Image (spheres, coloured by chain):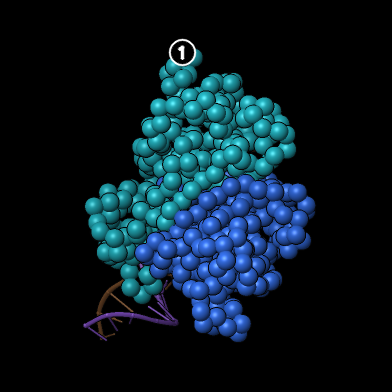
Chain colours: A blue, B cyan, C brown, D purple
Amino acid sequence: MGLPKYMMIRNHLMEKIEKMDVDTPIESERELALKYDVSRMTVRNAINELVNEGYLYRNKNKGTFIADKKETLNLGPASSSFLDLYNNEDVEYILIYYSVKKLPEISVRLDLKEDDLILRLVRLTKENNIAKSVDEIYYDYSYIKDFDVRNIYKLMNLSEYAKNGKLVQKITASIIPDKYANLLDIGYKLPGLLIESVIHQKDGKPIIYVKSYHSNKESIELTL
Amino acid sequence: MGLPKYMMIRNHLMEKIEKMDVDTPIESERELALKYDVSRMTVRNAINELVNEGYLYRNKNKGTFIADKKETLNLGPASSSFLDLYNNEDVEYILIYYSVKKLPEISVRLDLKEDDLILRLVRLTKENNIAKSVDEIYYDYSYIKDFDVRNIYKLMNLSEYAKNGKLVQKITASIIPDKYANLLDIGYKLPGLLIESVIHQKDGKPIIYVKSYHSNKESIELTL
DNA sequence: AAGTGGTCTAGACCACGCA
DNA sequence: GCGTGGTCTAGACCACTTC
């Protein structure tokens, strides 16, 4: 079975609005309902999603307009962390690089000795085929003794570890490193969010350290 | 004119669910529709708001349940410091500028008409005599009819408003505007965090919009 | 089989903005 | 006076879970 109607409309709208300028109006709800041959409520459902995600904003009695922030990550209750917080099915992780070696500057974060081995993964995270972040993931190598190159894709999925332990995250602004700018499809020397995360076991031992560079098309939203 | 029906239902639900335990189900949408004598779609509207705000979560074919809000409330002190939510004695606010005028680009945020008056305060926030952030604070002027210049310092304290309502924050990276660089005692063109906040009344009406530029000596820490 | 949330319809009236 | 989004109705069918 295919997507529900409102999702298809949502996606059609998304393609359009990406090409449009900020503050220009989209077609009215009634026009869209006619165009797609659905009821107005279905159009509203589609638009509601885009409004909640920050792509559009409504202006009563006037219309619906392109928002100035193209990307908004909604840190709702469902997503317990900034890691893997994309609700969408269309999230894709692309392995850029990996190695196993000593990384003294990282071992501090993982409460290891300088001589301990660390597995380093660098992945590109895409959602709906749009580059969202580059994530450097550092594992305590002894924690994954049975490591196997063929299983490396399993290691890119952090949500299970985060679910079963404690997560501490630090958010700072940072100029995106040049080496990642191309991957993120942005220019050089632009600001972005650097989210550093440490995933601990329940006993408190840190296992994974993540440095995640988010392009500034993104933002994080909290509701308190 | 009173609140719309779905808002009243939303508020009724809110009162109830605050007393309920996490993961317990609320009444079904059909039951609530009967109870409040409205259509099911109206109930869904009310529930949708609470789901989007993180108070409830839906479970298909099962029901709607109380969410665990603690995760998103469990923010570190740094993130809330600019909202005066924590009691550091050594926080100091310095008024840089204020005006009352029409600000069309802000009125959208406060759900006001373009012609409505807005009070704009710009303050420098220091902690332990170190500049932390420059905050642009926008008030719906009609909300503070009894405004008096002599009371302007009271308006710089946002904690009471935030405590009594809902707070939505959006975090992005931004180059700190040159006009604020000197105040923050940093160089030009450096990245920092831009935290946009909207403080709502309990009924959902937005009252205050804040743009807060944090020098990158700051960071936000979360424990989940 | 009964109940749930997810989606959808084809209308309706309202308050407001604008020309 | 017309178009807009905001709200609302009274149904409907679906896929799924639970009993």
Tell me the SS state at disc 1: helix
- In this rendering, position of residue A215 left or right of residue B120: right
Residue A45 visible in the current orientation: no
Quadrant position of the N terminus of chain A in the picture: bottom right
Asked which quadrant contains residue A154, the reply is bottom right
Residue A43: give x, y in percent of width and height.
56, 62
Q: Say if B61 sits above or below B57 in the image.
A: below
Residue ID for mark 1: B150
Residue at image position (28%, 54%) is B17
Question: In the depicted view, which residue is nearer to us: B35 or A103?
Answer: A103
The mark tally for this picture is 1
- In this rendering, position of residue B45 left or right of residue A104: left
Question: In the depicted view, which residue is nearer to us: A101 or A219?
Answer: A101
Q: Say if B39 sits above or below B110 in the image.
A: below
| Mark 1 surroundings: few (<14), some (14-19) or many (≥20) residues within 10 A | few
Q: Which amino acid does label 1 sit on?
A: Arg
Residue at image position (64%, 57%) is A213
Asked which quadrant contains residue A36, the reply is bottom right
Question: In the depicted view, which residue is nearer to us: B124 or A161?
Answer: A161
Residue B71: give x, y in percent of width and height.
39, 55
